Each structure stands twice: as C-alpha cells, then as structure tokens.
Amino acid sequence: MSWLHRVRKGIASITKRETPDNLWHKCPKCAQMIFTREFEDNAHVCPKCEHHGRIGPKARFHALFDEGSWTVLAQPAVREDPLKFRDQKRYTDRIKAARTATGETDALINAKGKIEGQKAVIGVQDFAFMGGSMGLGVGAAFVVGARQAIADKCPYIIFTAAGGARMQEGILSLMQMPKTTVAIAELRDAGLPYIVVLTDPTTGGVTASYAMLGDVQISEPGALIGFAGQRVIENTIREKLPEGFQRAEYLLDHGMLDMVVHRHELRATLAQLIGYLAPGKKAA
Amino acid sequence: MISYLDFEKPLAELHARIEELRETGESGSINIDAEIKKLQAKADKLQSDLYAKLSPWQKALVARHPDRPHFRDYVAGMVDDFMPLAGDRAFGDDQAILGGLGRINGQRVMVIGHEKGDDTASRLRHNFGMAKPEGYRKAIRLMELADRFGIPVVTLVDTAGAFPGIQAEERGQAEAIARSTEACIKLGVPMVAAIVGEGGSGGAVALAAANRVLMFEHAVYAVISPEGCASILWRTADKAADAAEAMRITASQLKTLGVIDRIVAEPVGGAHRDRELAIDNLKNAIADELKSLGNVSPAKLRQQRRDKFLTMGS
Ligand SMILES: [Zn+2]
C-alpha cells in the first residue's frame, strides 16, 4: 500500500466537513493556496514548496506502520496538576481544553506495530497538546514506550515536537529530563536501537534530553530544532540570527543530525535502518 | 560592605544608624553604647525574622546575591590539594564550568561546578556561570575520568541556565546537556550534587542527576526563571513573584516533592553574611553523604539513581 493511501486513511477520521472556510489551505511558507483535501492527501506537505506541516500521532501511525499491524498503547496514569498550578488560568482548565481539542490525554502517544514486517514501538509527541510540552504524562509515556520496546525486543522510535518543558508542572517537568534519559539507558542495556525523528518544532528541555540521544538522529526538512528560543538568543546577544538558524538543514551542516528525510521517505528509511540495527529481530 | 536586597531596606536603615552612632558618638559614652546595643539586638531580630519567612521570590534574589560564595570559594574552603583540570578535548575550555581533583576530609573527589565570578572581569571570564557546550563536555570528560578511577563525583550547581547564543547552538548546546545528564546517570561511583545558588533549568540538571541532591536553605531550583515563566504565562515579567510562588522553587518545597534529599542550613541572613560558616555547613553535609555512599557497589549506585528519577513525582 502506498504512503498516500495510508495517510489519507489516517486523516479521514479527523477531516472536517468541507466548508468554504476549510476548503483551501494557505501554505504558511510560500502562501500558495492548496485544496485542503490535496494537502491532506500529500501528508500535510505543501506540493509547491515541500513545507512540512505539523501532524499528530494517529496520522503518523497510519503513515508508518503496516496496515492493521498496530495498536495504541494505554496511557500511563500520572498525578494530575501536582503543584495545583494557576497562572492566568488554572492548569487543570488548560489540560481540559487540550484534551477536548485533541481527543488525547497528554502530549505523547505510543503505538506498537510493524514497519515493513519489522516490529517497532513508535512514540509521537503532539504539538497540538499544550505545545507538546513535557510533564509527568509525557515522561511516563516515554518510559512506557521504551519498556514496551524492551519487552518486544524491538526499536523505540520517537517523533519529537515540543516547545519544551511544561512550566505548570515546575521542577517536576525538569525532572523528566533525567527520567527519560534513564529509559534510554535501559534500551541501551537491552541492545535495542533508539531512533529519534525530530519534527517541527523541537526546543528547550526536550531537545536537551531524549531528542538528542538517539543512536541515529533523523529530522524532517525545515524543522526548527534548538535549545534556546530565538527571541531569547536575540535578546541576549543583540544580534540578528543567521539565515536558516536552528533549522534541520543547519543542524545537519553542524554535525548534529545523521540525515534530513522527506516525510514521504520516512517509512522506507526507518524500515531500512531497523533492518541494519535490529537484524534477526524481524517478526515472522 | 555588604549590598542589601530591596526587601532588606529596613535592615539596611538600622545598620546605617548603628554605623552612624559608632562614628559620631563619643567613644565610651554609656548612653550611646546602650543605644547601639539596643539597635543591634533589634537589627538581629529583624534579620532573623526576615530570613525565617522569605518568599520564594525573595529566595531567588538571595540565591543570586553577588556576595554569595561561588565555586572557587567553596573549593578553597572545603577541598584540600585541589588540582584543576581543563578542556573538552574538542573545542576549548569553558570557564563557566570548572572542575578538578581534590580531597574532602581525606576522601578523593572529582569536584565540578558552575562559576559565576565575583567582579566584572571574572564575571566576563566565567560568562556569569552560563556554560556553553564545551563546558558540559568538559564536565562529561571529568565524570568519565572519575568513574574509571573509582573517584566519587561532587557537583556544585549555580547557574541561571546554559548560555543562549548562536555559537552555543551551533556546537550543540542541547546535545551537550543531554549527554551530561546521561553521564551522571551512567556513573558507577557515588555522585553528590549540591544546588548552592541558582539551579536554572537544563543547564543545572545536567550536573545534578545524582544519587543525593543537597540544596542550600535559600537556594532555588526551577525549570525556568521566575521572570521567564511570568513573561510566558502571565505575559509580563513583572509577575515574577507570582510565578516564583506557583512554580515551587524553594528547598523546603522541593524536599516535600522528593526532588532533593537534604537541605543544608545557611547562616542567619544568608550564606553571603557568613561565607565561612556556609561553606563549612556544606562541607559537612557533602562529607556525610559521601560516607554513606562509600560502600555501595557500582551496580547499586546506578540502580539507585535510576529508580530515584524513574519514580520522582509519581
Ligand atoms: Zn508551500
């Protein structure tokens, strides 16, 4: 089955009824007006300039796993709002709104399945859920994904997308950096590949922990990847940032990535990589 | 001459009056001596009252006080025969993180920590304690060196955060921090971390994924600065005090959350008012923790560290 068919299937369930308002999609990069349907069929990649739009976990799973081979893993239960945090809004209200908007319980969803016949666990961070931010829920889900991979003796592949740590969980969000690092150590002990696919945007504490510890580092084209935010850097050094700064291609040039891979080629690339790093672990 | 924080204004006024009396009063005058004594007692009480109930935001200000001891002061005060080691073997030597071999109460240690500097020249040299990738890579190198030779690692954390700059990003700031955290997790030797001033975000945790995490009474440890949090969630940095309150950044709050293991007492009025006593308190606490971890096997040390961070917050 082609990636196109898979992606279309994955997105069908979340496509709204066509109205004049959503019939057209305007590319944020080249401003081209595209039929929404055509944009979705192209895996949310602009057919004119190849700009990669953001997509959520379900669309990823459909696009990457063999059809009918995958199941979503249960979300781990975590302490909700451990600090009873309130800024201008209650944190609990922000969570509720994110859950209503995405239909998910938190910002990292795992699924297990097969990629071209080879077992894998894939975790996908959802930028639509509070900017993909990392708190107890994301940290716990990461551990669940890594341990499922260990139980199934297969790679753990993480798709990152996050503005950083979830400030409303204060220090406990920061503590997800060592926590996820421990889960990666368990994968390494088990001799299993840990593969990172960076997507737009990946910044802050997520970049400075599990997003940079992959055995192989892949990124989608044009993804913003960095530790510090661009405004923070500009305010600190009072200089204009260079062209393409903190984009995937810039990181590739500076030795921080192995490859930048077009969304249409991701499935084949991952399948080949698993074949190299986890041979003999091919599912029957 | 100590510099006073804004909230210490009444204390500063009292101290100024005492000083004035001392200078202008006739020496030996019983009335003046009695007045000075009375004012001194009043000032002492005010100081201990102020510091007994510092708000989280006030603690953040104390933690950043320029007169607080810094890495080089701690090393001079508690590490014998210190031998500094330098460089990441790839790019350079980042003076925002210092490290080297030494002894604490006779115990061999690798001491690593942020140095903020204490005058304009040294602050620039140490980049105000904000490290670049080569700083974290130096820390990784020193941790791995210590591990190979069975030497416990002691880290002193005091940073507003890792440096946000073009070159730091270019050379992989995020990767360096991630690897430094990983290096802590991998150690087969005891690791004791102390948050001595500011524990700022990823740049702090990269040196603090330890078996035991100590924290000074008035130090702070947070995912983002109160100002940064306020400007994002409240849309104005003026709400820093509210953000400090909401984030739980103080030692006693973090002890309750299980993020730190032990609070180290500061002298009344903060570490900067009696640096020697502060350094001594820290030395005793670190020596105590090193002793308790002394006979634990490498496998158990690693497992203890893993379990601790896996279960934290749950
Ligand atoms: Zn376009």
Image (tube, coloured by chain):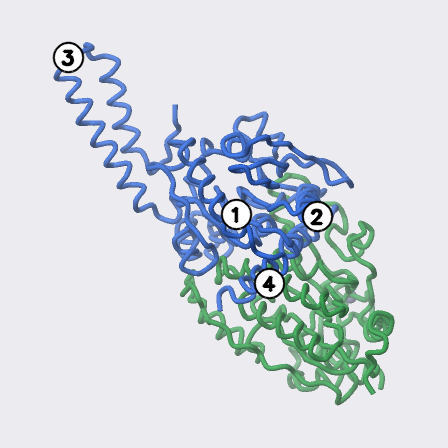
Chain colours: A green, B blue
Q: Dot 1 falls on which chain?
A: B
Label pair 3/4, CB-CB below 8 angstroms: no
In the image, are marks 1 and 3 on the same chain? yes
Q: What's the mark number on residue B290?
A: 1
Q: Earlier in the sequence, mark 1 or mark 3?
A: 3
The residue under label 3 is which amino acid type?
Ser
Q: Position of residue B213 (x, y in %)?
A: 50, 51
Q: Read off the residue under disc 2.
A: B148
Along the line of sight, the residue nearer the viewer: A29 or B157: B157
Q: Earlier in the sequence, mark 2 or mark 4?
A: 2
Label 3 and label 4: CA atoms lie apart by 67 Å
The residue under label 1 is which amino acid type?
Leu
Q: What's the mark number on residue B29?
A: 3
Label 2 and label 4: CA atoms lie apart by 18 Å
The residue under the point 60% across, 35% down is B102
The residue under the point 71% across, 59% down is A213
Ligand 1's image quarter is bottom right
Disc 3 secondary structure class: loop
Q: Earlier in the sequence, mark 4 or mark 1?
A: 1
Disc 2 secondary structure class: helix
Q: Earlier in the sequence, mark 2 or mark 1?
A: 2
